[in-house]
Every structure is written in structure tokens, then in C-alpha cells.
Image: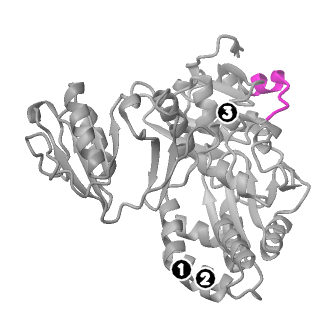
Amino acid sequence: MRLFLASIPLEDTRVVVVGGGEPALAKLRLFLGSPARLSWFAPELDASALEIPRTAPEPQRHEPSAADLDGARLVFIALPDLDQVRRIAALARAAGAQVNVVDQPALSDFQTPALIDRDEVVVGIATGGSAPILARDIRSRIEAVLPEGLAEVARMARELRDTVKSSVPDFLARRRFWERAFRGPAADLAAAGRTAEARREMLRLLNRAAPEAGVVHIVGAGPGDPELLTLKALRALQDADVIIHDRLVPDAVLDRARRDARRLYVGKTRGDHSVPQDQIEQLMIEEARAGHRVVRLKGGDPFIFGRGGEELAAVRAAGIPVFVVPGVTAALACAASAGIPLTHRDHAQAVTFVTAQAKPGGTDADWARLGGPNHTLAIYMGTDRAAETACALIAAGRAGSTPVAVVENGSRPDERILHGRLDGLAALVRGANLTGPALLFVGETAAFSLAQDAVEVAA
């Protein structure tokens, strides 16, 4: 280890920034929301050329003296004159402060790391001043996977720390308690801003006889491209003990999950449910009651023709904490991947997501209302009923020449895009020998495509 990162409490700590340019302002901004006592000396300040934060301290328009630096813990210097820098740095060190000279590692006692600031949780990435841009890039990647509510989790832990220490005096038992707390529903509730519920769950865990509570996350896996997973979905997968997934979730997405998580396949295809829906819901409940973090992983978005609402209601009725993580739904992903705008000022002022497969005994879509012009239809589960759908739309007034597109395996490496006309939709689907999930698009915008190898089929 060539560097050691130490954390310095900022309560009642005096921080001094010296300089009147943007580099000095960058250091000021680091501390504006902190409890530090902040002083700013700007002997050559040009206020008209800078956007000074409203909460910044009043700048002192002179070089700091020894008295000005008395009691300072950290001093940041951003001045172009190196003789002036050395003079101020010597005064700061004589006052007992640590000195950072911006962009001058050799003149500094420490370097400022690239920081991820979540208030109660701060992450630093340092390269010893040799590669600050690399540190910033690493910071951006880490920041993207840290939940915004992390500070609430840490704040709650701080508030309960003494209570936990007195209730669980054994060090190892206390460590196990915090592991359970930070990996279970309490942390999820705190991160979601449900502080009172999170606190109750933390206190419940203090009763060591209490069984560990499970939690369910109903997660949209998106259309299949693992890079289209949301950051929240990725975090849920990496924390899961059990993953209950469908046929439409590819291995490329499952590979992003925690390696030792149990994977339970409940694959469903149209008209062939290998595990009935009520049994899937019961499985989710049983696994959560066993104290597991359960991810119900569904293709696309769980609330767009994914029966996520039914599963949410079932888990809630069982009294189990449940969270929903939306996914990129297939219509959006397939259209974008194929270069099909779902709306367009010249061609479509509305878009409707509709399923061609009604619930057994249910009511079919009202094609008469959906047959108007200037309207894009994204039709789920429509390949088996392509002929009936086309006939219904034409009967409702949609022109037979209306462009259509079929996107199979949208966003995946084996994606296929086929173009045609509404009056030839049945032939287009029949001749395509589709084997993967496919969406139908009907409307003028369906003629658009970014694909170079799209197949054109005449009526």
C-alpha cells in the first residue's frame, strides 16, 4: 500500500482555502455542506469571472497571516505564485495544519482524493496525485452503484449505535447483528426514506430470538441486454439470496447476480405455465418467510403485462416487505434498438401498449378504438394472433398500407427486424419462423429503422 486514506471528523474543524480562482472554489465546494468552520482568503479575487456559491464564506481580500491560520486543521492553497505558496504553507504548518497545494503534490502534505459524498458515508479514491482523472473516472463508476439513500442507513446506524452496544455486548454477536441489519429489510426501508419502519425493524432485530425477516424485490430485468439493467436492479441481484426468474431472463442477466444465490426457474411461455402463478407467489412468500432476500426477476418491466401487480398484492397481503424495481420495458427497448420512434411530430401523436392475448375468459382489446391514424401501437404477445389483429385494425379504419414492424429478440445479439404492411402482417409473421420473444409495431413510425439488414416483405 503506497497511500493511506484517513478520515478526519469535520465537526468544529477549521478549514482554510486560499485562492481566488476556480481551483480554490472547487475546494470550497467540498466543505460547504459540512460542519467544518470554513475560511476563505482570496487576495486576487475577480468575483465577476466566477460563479460563487451563495453559501460560501465572505472572501478576505488579503493573504492570510500567521494569526489568520491559527487553529486551522486543513489548509488548501490555490495560487500561481510559488514563492507566495511556500510562504503561506510555512505559516500553516507552523500553526499545526496539514497543507494541500492544488496541482503541486511535491509541495503538499496530502492530496485530495476523488470523493463520493453521501453525507454520513464518504468514499475516497486516491492515486497519490499521479492520475487524478483516473480517480475521478473510478469515482463515477462506484458512485453509480451506491444508492442515494445510503446516508439514511448510516445515520440510523449512528443513532442506534449506543443502544446496540449496550444490548449486544459481545463483539462477534454485534457484528452479526449489523450484517443482518445492513443486508436486510431495515436497510432497504431506510434507503427508501421509510425511517420509522426501518427503525422498528432494527429494534426488532435486537431481539436475538426473533427470526430474521425476509424481503422481496420484484425486479424488471429489461429486454435481455444486461447493460440495460437499471443500477437498482443490479444492486438487488447482487444482494439476493434467492432469485426466482422467468424464461425471458437470459443467462447474461443472471450472470450479474451474486454467485452463491439460489436460482429458481419458474419459466412461463404463452399458454404453458410450468409453474402456476399462485404457486410462484407462494414460493416468493415462503422464501421470504425463511429469512431470505428474494428477487422475483421478470423480463422487461414487471408492471407492463408482467403480472407484477398481482405478485405485489400477494406479498403485501402476507405482511412481507416488498419493493418494486422497474425495468426497461420491451416496447421501449425494441423500438429504440430498431430505430423506431414510438412518437413523432409528423407521424404519431400517441402510442399505446396493448396485448393481443386476453386473460382466459377476459375481454379482447378494443381494436375499434385503437385503429385511428397518427397512433403507434406496440403489441405484446401478438405473433399468434397477427391475422386477427390486422383484420380488426383494418375493419376499424386503419389503412392496409399502414407500415408494420416485427422486432424479435430486441436489444439482444440475435435481434431481427422485419418490415411490411398491415395487410401483409400475417404473412410477414408466418414467413419469419420466429423462435424468440417478438413485438409488433403498427403505425407510420414503424417504417423507420436503423437496421441495415431489415427484411422488407410485400403484401
- Which residue is under mark 1? 160
Tell me residue 116's x, y (percent).
47, 47
Q: Amino acid at mark 2?
A: Val
Q: Amino acid at mark 1?
A: Leu
Image position of 334 (left or right of 350): right
User: Residue 406 location, x and y as percent?
Assistant: 69, 27
- Mark 2 neighbour class, 10 Å CA radius: few under 14, some 14 to 19, many 20 or more: some
**Residue 440: assigned label:** 3
Query: Which portion, as a residue range, is magenta?
Result: 426-436
Q: Residues within 10 Å of mark 3 (few under 14, many from 20)?
A: many
Locate residue 113 relative to residue 38 in the image: left or right. Answer: right
From the top left corner, tell me how far across and down residue 184 is, in percent: 68, 69
Q: Which labelled disc corresponds to residue 286?
A: none
Residue 90 vs residue 223, the one in the foreground: 90
For residue 69: magenta?
Answer: no
Measured in 3D between alpha carbons, the distance from the residue under mark 2 to the one under mark 1, in whole angstroms, is 6 Å
Q: Main secondary structure of the magenta part?
A: helix
Q: Which residue is mark 2?
A: 164
Is residue 96 among what the camera can see?
yes
Tag 3 secondary structure: strand
Which amino acid lies under the numbered mark 3 shown in the image of this protein?
A: Leu
Q: Position of residue 269 (x, y in %)?
A: 85, 47
- Where residue 252 sits, quadrant-wise, is top right
Q: Nearer the viewer, residue 288 or 83?
A: 83
Quarter of the picture holding the C terminus: top right
Q: Quadrant of residue 439?
A: top right
- Reading the chain from its start, which is encountered first: label 3 or label 1? 1
At 44% from the left and 28% from the top, the residue drawn is 344
